[in-house]
Structures are given as C-alpha cells and as structure tokens.
C-alpha cells in the first residue's frame, strides 16, 4: 500500500504544471484574416444607422475588423461590453457575458468576423451586438460571440488621446470620429468634490440612471460627465479633494469616451485611471 501511495503521489506531482495551449481556448480559431476594413470604414458604411438615436442593421457582407481592446469589465464600470480601437476609430462590442476581461485583456489584439452580427447606435454610440427592443442595439449572446472573434495574441498598448479644456471644442465638433476612444482629460476637477462626495453613491445624494451616477467637471460644462456604475470597484471612492485648501483637487482622468446623443460620458476603467496631480 505504501508503494502504491508513493507511485500515485509521484504521478500527481508531475501533473501540477501550468496548462499549455497551442491555440487560445476562447473564440473561433478557424477564422482566417480576409476583407479586413478599418473601424472608421465600418461606421461610414452605415450612416443611416447613426443618424437616429436608436437603430441597428445586420452586417451581410463578409467583412472583418481588427483592433486592440482598450477597456473591459475588469473594474466593473463597463458592463457586458468592451471597447475596441484601431488607428482610425473605436467601437463598443456588447456581449451578454460577465468576466470578459479574463480573455480580453487591455491591449489584446483581436479579429472580428462581422457577417451576421448587427451594428447600431445606442443613443448614437456605435456598437456591435444584436437587435434589442425593436430597432435598438443590445447584447449578442455569448455563443454567437464565440463564433465571431479570434484572439491574435499580440498584446500592446494604445496611448490615450490627451484632451484639455482648451482643445475640447475641436474634439466635441467631431463626436462621430472620437466616440468610443480611449482618452485622458487633463488637469480637471470635479464640480461636486467636497471631501465627502463619492463617484457613485447609493444614498440618494445624487440622481442615478441605470444604476450609474454622472459627475460633472468644472472645466467642461454639462456636455461632459464622468459616468460611474454603483457596481464599479471605485464607486465608493471620494472625489479628489484638497482637505488643506478646501477645494477640489486637480487630476487626470482616463477612460472610454462614450456618447449619449450630444453628451460625452467618460467611463473610467479602473482606479488607476484616476491620477492626482501633485
């Protein structure tokens, strides 16, 4: 019996190594790269879809897009969706699945086979997904998604576009080209910062829409808000405030610049996107 146990233990010890995958265990590895167009070209193919607040259209062409993931659901502020960006533009991909950050890390390059999927504009924000509530666009199923993308395995950074209040007029004037992109708002302060206010409280101190709070910035007016889910990891963090000077503290805010009609909604991805200016 001792000998048998020894052999069994030896066999078990040999089996504890990390699994090795010759191909990614997620997605459709049989997809081959062909008819790849840019994200900007894709959006430009469907001008009527984005002319109205909520429309969608099925993609019937055999076309593909390729880009890098710039934001996922790791921090809890992007729910069942992620942001994809290439050199020409960005788009939101909406999937009825939690925990996509486990295989779609920030910087991960992927290829999406678009034929059979739907493209739409939820409040004019370009999005890939499935029909929802009639003409609107919503989340595609996990099973459908797994058949339509391929992980390319090349992880690299995408530098956010730095936006200051001085150059915001130009960016705002071209919302169609900039929405969905990773941006950094430079040297900004929160209008509601008082040493107690948090990003997304549940105590009724701020109006919530779809379990999210909109926080205004002193430098950008009402057309730019920092939108935070009450489920985000940083929802209970205090808005940056200078206790000594008794005033809001300047910071750089990085996030996905999503669009809600004519309003920019900046979605912070994780606590590290909030950088206090010393």
Image: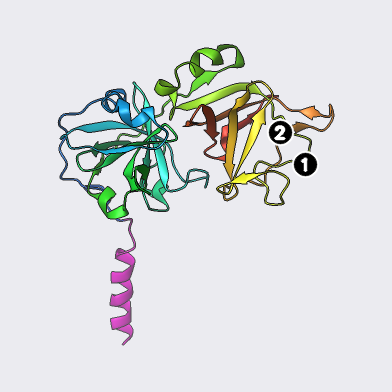
Place residue 227 in its image quadrant: top right
Magenta stretch: includes residue 220:
no
Q: As drawn, is 185 to the left or to the right of 25?
A: right
Q: Residues within 10 Å of mark 2 (few under 14, many from 20)?
A: many
Q: Nearer the viewer, mark 1 or mark 2?
A: 1
Q: As drawn, is 145 to the left or to the right of 104?
A: left
Above or below — where is 77 with respect to 7? above
Q: Quadrant of the C terminus?
A: top right
Place of residue 134 in the rendered image (x, y in percent of width and height, measured from the top left): 34, 47
Place of residue 118 in the rendered image (x, y in percent of width and height, measured from the top left): 28, 41
What is the secondary structure assignment of the residue under circle 2? loop
Which label is found at residue 256?
none
- Residue at 50% x, 12% y: name it: 170
Does the magenta stretch mainly form a helix, a strand or a loop?
A: helix
- Residue at 34% x, 21% y: name it: 88
Q: Which residues are magenta?
A: 1-18
- Between 60 and 41, the one nearer to me in the picture: 60
Which label is found at residue 240?
2
Place of residue 41 in the rendered image (x, y in percent of width and height, measured from the top left): 27, 23
Q: CA distance from mark 1 to mark 2?
A: 10 Å
Is residue 271 visible to the viewer in this orientation of the structure?
Answer: no
Which label is found at residue 196?
1
Place residue 29 in its image quadrant: top left
Magenta stretch: includes residue 15:
yes
Q: Residues within 10 Å of mark 1 (few under 14, many from 20)?
A: few
Is residue 59 visible to the viewer in this orientation of the structure?
Answer: yes
Q: Residue furthest bottom?
A: 1
- Residue at 41% x, 44% y: name it: 81
Q: Earlier in the sequence, mark 1 or mark 2?
A: 1
């Amino acid at each position: 019996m001792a000998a048998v146990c020894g052999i069994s233990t030896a066999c078990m010890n040999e089996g504890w190594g990390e699994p090795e995958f010759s191909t990614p265990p997620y997605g459709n590895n049989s997809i081959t790269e062909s008819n790849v167009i840019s994200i900007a070209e894709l959006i430009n193919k469907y001008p009527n879809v984005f002319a109205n607040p909520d429309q969608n259209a099925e993609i019937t062409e055999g076309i593909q897009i390729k880009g890098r993931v710039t934001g996922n659901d790791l921090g809890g502020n992007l729910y069942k969706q992620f942001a994809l960006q290439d050199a020409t533009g960005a788009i939101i991909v909406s999937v009825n699945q939690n925990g996509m950050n486990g295989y779609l890390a920030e910087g991960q390059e992927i290829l999406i086979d678009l034929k059979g999927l739907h493209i739409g504009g939820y409040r004019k924000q370009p999005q890939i997904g499935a029909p929802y509530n009639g003409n609107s666009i919503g989340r595609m199923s996990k099973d459908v998604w797994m058949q339509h993308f391929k992980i390319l395995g090349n992880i690299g950074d995408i530098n956010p576009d730095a936006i200051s209040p001085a150059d915001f007029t130009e960016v705002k004037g071209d919302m169609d080209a900039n929405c969905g992109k990773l941006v950094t708002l430079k040297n900004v302060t929160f209008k509601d910062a008082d040493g107690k206010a948090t990003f997304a409280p549940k105590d009724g101190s701020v109006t919530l829409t779809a379990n999210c709070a909109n926080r205004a910035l002193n430098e950008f007016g009402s057309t730019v808000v920092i939108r935070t889910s009450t489920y985000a990891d940083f929802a209970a963090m205090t808005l940056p405030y200078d206790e000594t000077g008794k005033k809001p503290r300047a910071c750089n805010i990085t996030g996905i610049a999503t669009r809600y009609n004519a309003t920019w909604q900046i979605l912070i991805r994780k606590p590290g996107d909030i950088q206090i200016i010393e």
